[in-house]
Amino acid sequence: MTTRRNFIATASKGLLGASAIPAFGPIRPGLRRTASGTGLVYDRRYLDHVLPERAGEAHPESPLRLVRMMEVFAERGLDQAVLPLSLLDDSLSHVQYAHTAEHVDSVSTIDVSGRIAELAVSGALGAVEAVARGTVKNAFCASRPPGHHANNTGAEEGFCFYSNAAIAARYAQRVHGFERILIIDWDYHHGNATQNAFYDDPSVLFFSTHDWQAYPGTGDPAMTGEGEGTGSNINWHLDCGARDVDMLRAWDEALLPAVSRFQPDFIIVSAGFDSRRDDLLGCFDVTDDAFRRMTRIALDLAEDFTDGRLVSLLEGGYNVEGNALAAAAHLETLLDGS
């Protein structure tokens, strides 16, 4: 059982070509394991996805986000410390966990971007597969496009095409038999598609910190779920200018008590670094230290409840340098905890 702590006081090269995770039977969640290490999902094809210019300027969700991130990983030696993970084949057969056939058919027709969006799902599922099987203890997906705004509209929403975190959660449940999934979303923008996927589902606890006055205009704290899922949806609004202490207060006051009651057996993080200071599309004043501390708390929760199982998926983050530095702080902490 988690001991509550007051957390307020307190390489773009060489990452492909790893052997595929073997396809054995589902993992029994109750079994203890001796997994160690941190996995990294990255594929150079993620750089092929390019959204149209906005007002004559490059789109903020650009390949440079990953280019600079992988450079910083290499500069800090992180690319040599992680285990490269393979993407899961045939991810479209699992996209149906969160999307209609009509949505999938429509996205599949979008040249290049539709294919790369499928690869982002493949990366998320490859990470879940590796963590579930004990190949690694935790994993980070340096992938794009992001996913937590992707509903069933048949088109891109908020730079998202498929709801990567929601699909990964269902995959963990349906393929590997995990029963209670915790999804933590610290992106500046509310993960509306993740909320929609599980709003009446008591088997998934969704916790989001965000500015609900920003895009997509959802994330009202009064929305706590419905039916059997009432209480399993936690929205925590933060005002523009929110600092580390504000972000961590939400974790201390809302997340930790909820997790103690929920007792997850698998954790997924929607790691959006547009909540970092100086982001192009956000207005929080959150530092890299907060990302280290939030990652450390998530790892502590994983140790207490999930035998360490945690998968983190890149969402937003549009200051190219800031996004890379925050992701590096996150990955360094994952490595420290593995």
Image: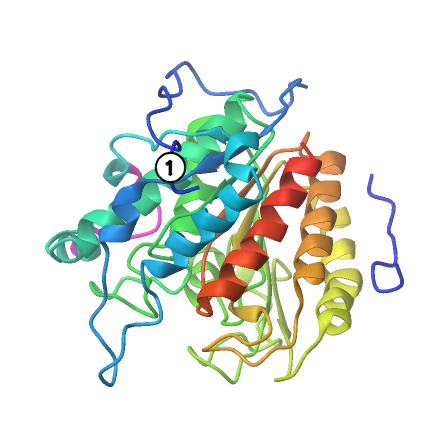
As rendered, which of 256 and 320 lies closer to the eye? 320
Task: Answer with left or right where residue 168 lies relative to residue 272.
Answer: left
Q: Name which quarter of the figure residue 52 lies in.
A: bottom left
Question: Does any portion of residue 177 appear in the rendered image?
Answer: no
As rendered, which of 199 and 287 lies closer to the eye? 287
Question: Does any portion of residue 77 appear in the rendered image?
Answer: yes
Q: Residue at x 64, y 22 (%)?
A: 30
Q: Residue at x 20, y 63 (%)?
A: 154
The image shows residue 66 at horizontal and vertical percentages of: 39, 53
The image shows residue 133 at horizontal and vertical percentages of: 51, 21
Q: In the rendered structure, does residue 335 fall within the stretch colored magenta?
A: no
Quadrant where the C terminus is found in the figure: top right
Task: Answer with left or right where residue 262 lies relative to residue 168.
Answer: right
The image shows residue 131 at horizontal and vertical percentages of: 53, 29
Query: What residue range appears in magenta?
Result: 94-102
Q: Residue at x 45, y 49 (%)?
A: 71
Q: Secondary structure at mark 1?
A: loop
The type of residue carrying mark 1 is Lys
Q: How is the image coloured?
A: rainbow
Task: Answer with left or right where residue 5 lies relative to residue 117.
Answer: right
The image shows residue 290 at horizontal and vertical percentages of: 70, 61
As rendered, which of 259 and 324 lies closer to the eye? 324
* Residue annotated with mark 1: 13
Q: Check the image and report above or below for 54 versus 254.
A: below
